[in-house]
Image: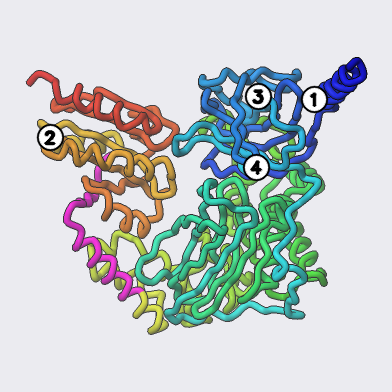
Amino acid sequence: MKKILLTIIALLSIVGSQAKGKDVVWEKTHSLDNISGVYLTVNKMEFKSDETVMHIGASYLPKYWIKFVKESVLKDQDGKEYAIISGEPTCEGESRMEIDSLFWMPESGEANLALHFQPLPKDTKRVDFIDGDKEGMLSIWNICSAEKPTPLPEEWRNLNYTANETLPNAKVGKGIATLKVRMIDCRPEMNSRLGIQHLKLQINGMPDKEIKFDDNGYIEVQLPTALACPIALGSRGIFFTFCIIAPGETVECLINPYAQDGEKCIFNGYMARTNTEYAKEWEKIDNEKFASKEFFSALQKCSTPDERFKVLTEEFNKAKEEINKRNDICDATKALLRMDVEGKYLRWIKNYAREYVVLIINMGNEKAPKSWDDYMAKMEKYKDDLNNIDYYPRKEEDFEVFSAPYAPCSQTYWDQYPLVSYSLSDKSNFNLNILDNIYGTKLILENKSEEWEYYTTGITDSGCLALAEEYRQEMKCKLDLSQNVYFHKLDSIAPEKIIDTILEKYKGKTVLVDVWATWCGPCRQGHIELAPLKEELKDKDIAWVYISAPSSNVSQWQQMIINIPGDHYFINKEQYDYIMRKLYESDGIPTYAIYNANGTMTFKNIGFPGRDKIRLELEKAMKVEE
């Protein structure tokens, strides 16, 4: 009996020692987050006997808040949940996070936090951080040790690319490009989406779009286009890159979220080698070219515009020469990189003060601006007359991005610099910049033939002209068919009178003003949230007013407003800046304001306050005594 008792004690001792055994620490981790605007990085995971600690880095707008709710959990690979305990810091470099309270980001926009949870098993292989069950909550997925990366699918290993690729010459012709994308370790509950932007010469007016990955992490989409051109691909917090598509061609892309930044995207199919190489290289132009300490030092020694222009030109020639000498990339990739360098060079010439301010901040010689006014003051400090002198070489043949027949394959070509030439038709018989600019302008709505002729004068190619006319008629037809959307043009109104002019149309009504943009996810979510409320209050005397500005893609805006009942105003930049900065004192969107029947503002909020809050404030405004 004594022997049995001793054996039991020994076993319990072993179990106890194992329970109290050595902590498991993941010093380096892989993880995914897909929250718009907020970037969360898991710096370390500690699996202890009495708790699990997740050390994270948070990046967000300075003086904005984030929040972790008391319902937050860690979920292991078996689906078991472990509740959050506290947000107490574990070292001097971490900030205290009060659970279920607002945490305001410091001026740096960076914060390190420690979140404590109930203890997970020390043999845990994968963890998800779920911050509550409401849409839009902060979440981090597939947290795992970086020591064992997920292998590539077999069919994507050791791809054989062609020995060389060259960019195709621009040729207008309607067609469909096919894009197939697969993301490694993408799971349905992550709700991951692929953003597709900068679609050029779109037929059928297709706006930039965001598409959900299916349950297996796949997406296949048909993209109407009229020539070989670049598109931007990205998924929030995971990756961003460019690739070239073309009518009748298929581009395949594999996303490996855990790879190094420049190696997250592998391409197959059309322009596979170029797209793969460029995905690794494009960011280096902004991060390395015109950004070295030697370049900065040379500029600091300059005292005249001529000297600065000489330094810029030398750096420009040096950067292009370095690209030409490379043997590890194909000719097409070299051409794209050279045109990127040209774009960077032209930005410096046109906006020297802005580029120089960014450079001195990156070099650590000045602190980042705290506000827009602070930024403008810094620019004024370094204001230069460089752009007031005719430094810009007017010979288009000096720049591939202006003269090369394959230039539309470069995003730089489409960036619409103020310096871009409008006489490309002399060489290629069409001007795609003008054609793309026509898409979505007010000309489509107003249909003024004399202005249309003015803007299309630079287009001599019959195919381009036919494409522009087809697009104009199609967009005009779509807007004419819209039964519940009204568009108003108020370009001639002074900025300080814009809101009063708008409100004048709704005397005696309660008015909700929604300031939004096509690229703003929370804005679009607000429209969805308010749709049931609008239906509920449809018999009330309420005007729903939506205001957008030139930061929105006009053609995309035209598509969106068809599905947003109300009165829509596309105001100019000066009007927008006035109402946001002076009137609403807002530095973010969506911004909401409610006015009573007397035209008095009774409510204002930056960010969507919730459907119930909007209902309450509308009801208050409607109770104003006559």
The boundaries of the magenta stretch are 468-494
Q: How far apart are the two marked residues, 4 and 1, measured between alpha carbons?
A: 20 Å
Q: Nearer the viewer, mark 4 or mark 2?
A: 4
* Among numbered discs 4 and 2, the one appearing first in the sequence: 4
Q: Check if mark 1's residue and mark 3's residue have beta carbons within 8 Å.
A: no
- For discs 2 and 1, the disc positioned in front in the rendered view: 1
Nearest the viewer among 305 and 524 is 524
Q: Is residue 22 magenta?
A: no
Kindly give the residue lying farthest to the right in the view shown: 3
Q: Is residue 27 above or below residue 620?
A: below
Quadrant of the rendered structure where residue 441 is?
bottom left
Tell me if mark 4 has few (under 14), some (14-19) or many (20+) residues whose alpha carbon lies within 10 angstroms of its own: few
Going 82% across and 72% down the picture, which residue do you hit?
Answer: 327
Indicate the secondary structure of the residue bearing disc 4: loop
Position in image of residue 594 (x %, y %):
25, 29
Circle 4 is placed at which residue position? 77
* Distance between the alpha carbons at the discs numbered 1 and 3: 14 Å
Task: Check disc 2 and report the residue beneath it.
Answer: 540
- Give the residue type that dot 1 points to: Ala
Q: Amino acid at mark 3?
A: Gln
Can you identify the residue that label 3 sits on? 118
What residue would you read off at disc 1?
Answer: 19
Tell me: residue 244, above or below residue 131.
below
